[in-house]
Image (cartoon, helix red, strand yellow):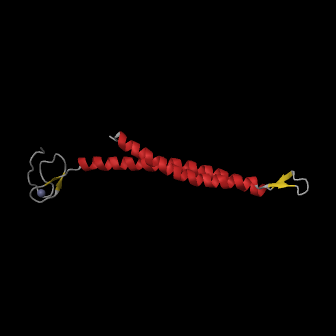
Amino acid sequence: MVTWIKAMKAAGRTILYSIAWGAIGMVLMLAGVLLMQNQIIYDPYSGYPIGVNWAGAVGGLLLLIMGYLVALLGLYASIYKVGADVILDELKAMGLSATVRRRCPSCGAEVPEGARFCNRCGTPLEAPP
Ligand SMILES: [Zn+2]
């Protein structure tokens, strides 16, 4: 079973990873916002906005969306990555205790659980303790 301490450590790691991805996403989003802001065309005489540079505005919006997706992807990827690591660790720990293998005293071959004879040399085996 995964202990709470282990789970908490994993949660901490998840948060750290997601903060890192969030920071990358924020930079992209900020760049998108800045790009969008500078795409309003002002009339040079009156100073009033008279139009929008759509290519730049749409580019900024795409950057904004991309930044959001990067942050979101990073968050979920962090959860899956750390979760998978925890599960793998747990499986490894279980595997180690489950594979205390018996060996034939005569030839040293690995013998399956509960076998009464060595399947390589046929030596009778003691019953498992
Ligand atoms: Zn044997």
Residue 39 falls left or right of residue 68 = right
Nearer to me, 44 or 85? 44
Residue 74 falls left or right of residue 117 = right
Q: Position of residue 48 (x, y in %)?
A: 87, 51
Residue 9 falls left or right of residue 29 = left
Residue 32 falls left or right of residue 104 = right
Instruction: Please give the count of numbered marks on the rendered protein.
Output: 0
Nearer to me, 21 or 80? 21
Of all residues, the one furthest to the front in this rendering is 46
* Rendering quadrant holding ligand 1: bottom left
Q: Position of residue 114 (x, y in %)?
A: 16, 45
Instruction: Please tell me which residue is depicted at 9% across the width and 48% down the height of the picture.
Output: 126
Instruction: Please tell me which residue is depicted at 54% across the width and 52% down the height of the picture.
Output: 21
Q: Considering only vertical position in the picture, is 51 above or below 8?
A: below
Instruction: Please tell me which residue is depicted at 76% across the width and 55% down the height of the picture.
Output: 38
Q: Position of residue 5 (x, y in %)?
A: 36, 42
Q: Assign the N terminus to one quadrant of the image.
A: top left
Instruction: Please tell me which residue is depicted at 39% across the width and 50% down the height of the picture.
Output: 85
Nearer to me, 102 or 44? 44
Of all residues, the one furthest to the right in this rendering is 45
Q: Position of residue 82 (x, y in %)?
A: 43, 49
Nearer to me, 27 or 126? 27
Q: Assign the C terminus to one quadrant of the image.
A: top left
